[in-house]
């Protein structure tokens, strides 16, 4: 009880600074299940507003899918609510092993280990498989969880310019004397929606005897012809040494993640990865839900096909309307506005028009690259997308940015 | 010394600068946000390979790497 006024004041000042800088995160309360149509209380205390959600990671629309919900109920009934244990003491059920085996088959790897989240998987994997004699060479735009995992690992760390394969090769040459080299990338980059050049990276890794790591959280379930992920899209199934991914996005949206890859590397995680060893096993209802998700996705590609069509429709609609988009073909479609305040104003106006989309600006994205990041789902029907496009057109017209170049928008609103 | 400064400056620009930021011999590299602490590794390795030296980890501090001039002073401590 030494939480004095002085101590309180220190934290108040820090939080006040965040508010002043405009980077204080304000949560909006959703009163419905996660879906294309949601009911939101925002600002806090206001009456509920029905809006179309275009900022969820619910890529396959499975977060509230009746079969998944039913499977989770069944898992709850048969295997209980929680295990009150880590995996290696008394926290491993038959369904945990079943899910690991299903993920291995789905991703086309040798073995899989579950983690409480992909954040934990990325936090634990590098320290478990690498030592100070090794080097990690990562893309400069990898996810924050990978950066945290890298920081926890004693291996040397270097970076290469985003998706620059010549630079990566230079780094592989520079560090060729290391015992092990690991090239680290996201599969789909979450802020820009672009895809890693895994085919080129696999070639370089073969040439320089390096391991290839990919976080496929924004790809598993829907990227590639059968939704296996970025490695399927790039034609390198079976060549990946480590894939980490989450069950908190396309694969059901609840929680949990995994490391999947070479048998020995997965076993190293089972023996040494601290987030695996020192935190609880994934709850049985979630495990049962993810098993159902993989059954649905293995039986048919209908959902990822619908997502692909929705994405094409959405990109074309926004492009035809005159917005500037980041290039790409994934369901992450960033609408570029460049100016931070403009991104916040447009997000607010879209909400008024019944569309829930969030503006991102520095430091989440580089300075001068503020945007509305839209994310498309197989849970969207054409009428959702048409209504959302109407809102975008109306708001875009209000701010007179339709058909304008980047330079023109910057001249009017600043960087 | 001038040749070394130019080599290091050019390396920094090629390696870390992705826009039209001007880099001089005194530009703050680490404190100025041009080189992040992760990326110091490649700079250290570049210097070690280029000048056939070994810079002890405790000498490769953000302060010692904060400008081309400071880096040259550090490198010259180890060049035979």
Image: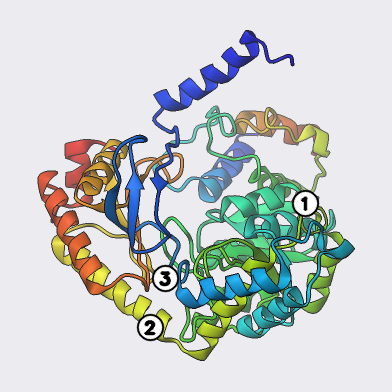
Using the image, determine if residue A66 lies above or below residue B51: below
Where residue B31 sits: x, y (%)?
58, 29
> Which labelled disc corresponds to residue A61?
3
Q: Within 10 Å of the Cα at label 1, are there few (<14), some (14-19), or many (20+) other Cα atoms? A: many
As helix, strand or loop, the secondary structure at mark 1 comes to loop
Where residue A364 sits: x, y (%)?
46, 44
Are the residues under badges 1 and 3 in a single subunit? yes
Q: Is residue A320 left or right of residue B69?
A: left
Q: Within 10 Å of the Cα at label 2, are there few (<14), some (14-19), or many (20+) other Cα atoms? A: some
Disc 3 versus disc 2: distance between alpha carbons?
12 Å
> Which labelled disc corresponds to residue A305?
2
- The answer to the question of whether label 1 and label 3 lie on touching residues, with beta carbons closer than 8 A, is no
Determine the chain carrying the residue at label 3: A
What colour scheme governs how the chains and residues are painted in the rendered image of this protein? rainbow
Seen at 69% across and 62% down, the residue is A81
Disc 2 versus disc 1: distance between alpha carbons?
39 Å
Q: Earlier in the sequence, mark 3 or mark 2?
A: 3
Visible residue check, residue A367: yes
> In the rendered image, which quarter contains the N terminus of chain A?
top right
Where residue A327 sits: x, y (%)?
33, 65
Determine the chain carrying the residue at label 1: A
- The answer to the question of whether label 2 and label 1 lie on touching residues, with beta carbons closer than 8 A, is no
Q: Considering depth in this image, is A106 or A340 the residue closer to the camera?
A: A106
Q: Nearer the viewer, mark 2 or mark 1?
A: 2
- Can you identify the residue that label 1 sits on? A153
Visible residue check, residue A289: no
As helix, strand or loop, the secondary structure at mark 2 comes to helix
> In the rendered image, which quarter contains the C terminus of chain A?
top left
Q: Is residue A211 left or right of residue A274?
A: left
Residue farthest along the front direction in this orientation: A77
């Amino acid at each position: 009880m030494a939480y004095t006024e002085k101590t309180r004041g220190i934290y108040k000042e820090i939080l006040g600074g965040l508010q002043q800088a405009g980077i204080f995160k304000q949560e909006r309360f959703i009163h419905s299940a996660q879906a294309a149509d949601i009911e939101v209380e925002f600002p806090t205390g206001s009456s509920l507003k029905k809006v179309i959600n275009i900022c969820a990671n619910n890529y396959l629309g499975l977060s509230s899918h009746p079969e998944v919900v039913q499977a989770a109920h069944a898992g709850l009934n048969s295997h209980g609510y929680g295990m009150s244990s880590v995996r290696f003491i008394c926290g491993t059920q038959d369904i945990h092993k079943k899910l690991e085996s299903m993920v291995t088959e789905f991703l086309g790897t040798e073995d899989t280990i579950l983690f409480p989240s992909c954040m934990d998987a990325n936090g634990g994997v590098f320290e478990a498989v690498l030592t100070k004699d090794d080097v990690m060479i990562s893309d400069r735009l990898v996810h924050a969880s990978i950066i945290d995992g890298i920081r926890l690992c004693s291996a040397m760390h270097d970076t290469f310019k985003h998706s620059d394969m010549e630079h990566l090769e230079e780094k592989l040459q520079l560090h060729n004397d290391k015992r092990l080299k690991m090239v680290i990338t996201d599969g789909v980059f979450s802020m820009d929606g672009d895809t890693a050049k895994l085919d080129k990276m696999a070639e370089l890794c073969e040439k320089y005897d390096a391991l290839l790591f990919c976080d496929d959280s924004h790809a598993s379930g829907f990227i590639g012809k059968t939704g296996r992920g970025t490695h399927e899209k790039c034609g390198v199934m079976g060549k990946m040494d480590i894939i980490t991914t989450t069950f908190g996005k396309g694969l059901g949206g609840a929680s949990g993640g995994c490391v999947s890859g070479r048998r020995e590397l997965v076993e190293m995680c089972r023996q040494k990865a601290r987030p695996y060893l020192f935190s609880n096993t994934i709850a049985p209802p979630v495990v049962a839900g993810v098993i159902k998700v993989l059954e649905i996705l293995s039986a048919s590609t209908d959902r990822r096909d619908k997502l692909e069509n929705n994405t094409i429709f959405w990109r074309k609609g926004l492009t035809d309307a005159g917005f500037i988009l980041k290039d790409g073909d994934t369901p992450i479609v960033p609408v570029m506005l460049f100016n931070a305040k403009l991104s916040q104003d447009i997000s607010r106006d879209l909400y008024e028009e019944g569309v829930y989309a969030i503006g991102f600006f520095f430091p989440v994205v580089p300075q001068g690259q503020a945007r509305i990041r839209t994310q498309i789902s197989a849970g969207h029907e054409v009428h959702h997308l048409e209504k959302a496009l109407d809102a975008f057109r109306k708001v875009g017209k209000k701010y007179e940015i339709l058909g304008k170049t980047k330079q023109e928008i910057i001249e009017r609103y600043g960087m | 010394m001038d040749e070394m400064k130019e080599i290091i400056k050019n390396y920094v620009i090629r390696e870390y600068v992705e826009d039209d930021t001007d880099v001089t011999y005194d530009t703050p590299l680490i404190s100025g946000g041009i080189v992040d602490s992760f990326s110091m590794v490649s700079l250290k390795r570049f210097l070690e390979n280029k000048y056939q030296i070994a810079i002890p980890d405790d000498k490769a501090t953000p302060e010692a790497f904060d400008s081309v001039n400071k880096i040259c002073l550090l490198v010259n401590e180890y060049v035979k």
